[in-house]
């Protein structure tokens, strides 16, 4: 029966491979499934990974791909334990997504030890392609340097010279504040103060009062997800913007603006790697995604999961499948191949693992300017990929040396 099925398949396919003998590669999407970052990644990132597999159809290229998912609860020890089980018991080949930089930095070392592949779509710390780079890391969507480079330069260009940072007290927040501070100073601005707020806090009152008393022109939010939403709403309640200070969201997602509402978020400048309404291709994919995601449009992290998974599968297709079990070999092949997909366009992956593509500076629309739900952004500027990310020789990545 198997032979008959194979003969029949020859009429449709150039080669015939028994599906039971095809090698299977496993990708584990690891993120926050129900907490602070669930909206920007969560189940939507798992959907994006599955859509990538459906669209690529790896069976037509001689292999199969399975997608697993787990919740790291934004805790490094839980993330490492899940990843170790995936590698040792479930034979997972690639870990995907991983918001929360402290979790990603811990997992990165385990991925290197086990020689697997790490597709980093949501963790922001630029250290992942700097001093903490490994030959197994591909940092896809954005990083703290690119966010700071886009937003800080634009805000200073509009006259915002004095800055106060409200910083999330973990690896990502500190990296973002560091990178933004460096760019503010390089552009002739000054940093008049900074305060660190506990991760996942619900009361920013004492921190906002410090920002208010600093008299800084710009109160920069070096946080993310639910922390950003809460701090922006409470800043409005405390009258920061009414008093003449401006908020700069250094990492703001589409889902954050949805949660804030345009009345609160209007006028915010922000930098993103992807927006659903950029062109016909991003619109078509995003509408397919939203139809399967309870009407919620994709964030740039979820788009990054889709695109990085596609490129990973293209690399496996181009390799000997036994060699593709090695993360260093797969990542090296990914670096050799130009990147191209409907969501991020054409790009490349550098020696340090940084994916290079355009970034975009947006301004959040006024309620009167929005024509439909999720019509939130006005494009202010496109930042070419070769200008959007930190120069490779400035990151301290040992692979570059």
Image (tube, rainbow, N blue to C red):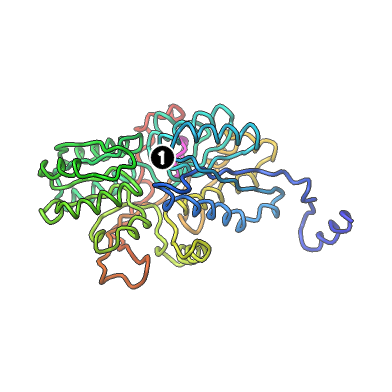
Quarter of the image holding residue 174? top left
- Find residue 78 and report its horizontal and vertical position in percent: 49, 34
Decide if residue 353 is on the left or right side of residue 195. Answer: right
Residue tagged 1: 100
* Residue occupying image coordinates x 41% and y 40%: 100
Between 287 and 395, the one lying in front of the other is 287
Q: In which quarter of the image is the C terminus?
A: top left
Between 209 and 138, the one lying in front of the other is 209
- Find residue 315 and report its horizontal and vertical position in percent: 60, 44
In the depicted structure, whether residue 277 falls above or below residue 134: below
**Outermost residue toward the front in this view:** 203
Q: Does the magenta stretch include residue 193?
A: no
In the depicted structure, whether residue 101 falls above or below residue 41: above
Decide if residue 292 is on the left or right side of residue 130. Answer: right
Callout 1: SS: loop
**Helix, strand or loop for the magenta stretch, by majority:** loop
Q: Quadrant of the N terminus?
A: bottom right
- Find residue 148 and report its horizontal and vertical position in percent: 29, 44
Decide if residue 6 is on the left or right side of residue 297. Answer: right
User: Magenta segment, which residues?
Assistant: 350-355
- Find residue 139 and report its horizontal and vertical position in percent: 45, 41
* Residue occupying image coordinates x 30% and y 58%: 260
């Amino acid at each position: 029966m198997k032979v008959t099925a194979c003969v029949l398949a020859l009429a449709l396919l150039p080669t015939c491979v028994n599906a039971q003998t095809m090698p299977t590669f496993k990708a584990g999407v690891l993120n926050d499934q129900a907490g602070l970052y669930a909206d920007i990644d969560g189940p939507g990132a798992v959907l994006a990974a599955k859509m990538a597999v459906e669209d690529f159809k790896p069976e037509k290229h001689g292999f199969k791909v399975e997608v697993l998912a787990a919740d790291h609860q934004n805790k490094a020890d839980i993330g490492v334990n899940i990843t170790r089980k995936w590698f040792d018991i479930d034979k997972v080949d690639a870990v995907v997504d991983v918001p929360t930089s402290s979790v990603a930095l811990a997992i990165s070392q385990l991925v290197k030890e086990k020689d697997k592949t790490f597709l980093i779509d949501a963790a922001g710390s630029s250290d992942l392609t700097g001093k903490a780079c490994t030959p197994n890391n591909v940092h896809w969507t954005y990083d703290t340097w690119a966010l700071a480079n886009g937003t800080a330069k634009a805000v200073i260009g509009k006259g915002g010279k004095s800055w106060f940072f409200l910083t999330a007290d973990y690896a990502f927040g500190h990296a973002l504040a560091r990178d933004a501070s460096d760019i503010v100073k390089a552009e002739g601005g000054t940093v008049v103060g900074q305060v660190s707020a506990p991760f996942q806090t619900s009361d920013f009152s004492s921190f906002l009062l410090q920002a208010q008393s600093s008299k800084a022109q710009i109160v920069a939010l070096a946080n993310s997800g639910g922390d950003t939403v809460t701090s922006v709403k409470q800043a409005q309640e405390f009258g920061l913007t009414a008093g003449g200070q401006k908020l700069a969201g250094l990492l703001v997602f589409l889902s954050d603006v949805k949660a804030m509402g345009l009345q609160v978020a209007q006028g915010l400048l922000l930098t993103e790697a992807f927006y659903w309404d950029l062109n016909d291709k991003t619109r078509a994919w995003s509408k397919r995604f939203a139809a399967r995601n309870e009407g919620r449009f994709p964030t740039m992290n979820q788009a990054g999961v889709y695109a990085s998974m596609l490129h990973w599968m293209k690399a496996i297709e181009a390799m000997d499948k036994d060699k593709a079990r090695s993360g260093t070999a797969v990542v090296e092949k990914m670096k050799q191949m130009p990147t191209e997909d409907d969501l991020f366009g054409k790009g490349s992956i550098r020696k340090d693992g940084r994916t290079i593509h355009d970034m975009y500076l947006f301004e959040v629309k006024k309620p009167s300017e929005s024509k439909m739900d999720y019509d939130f952004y006005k494009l202010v500027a496109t930042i070419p990929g070769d200008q959007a990310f930190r120069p490779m020789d400035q990151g301290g990545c040992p692979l570059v040396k």
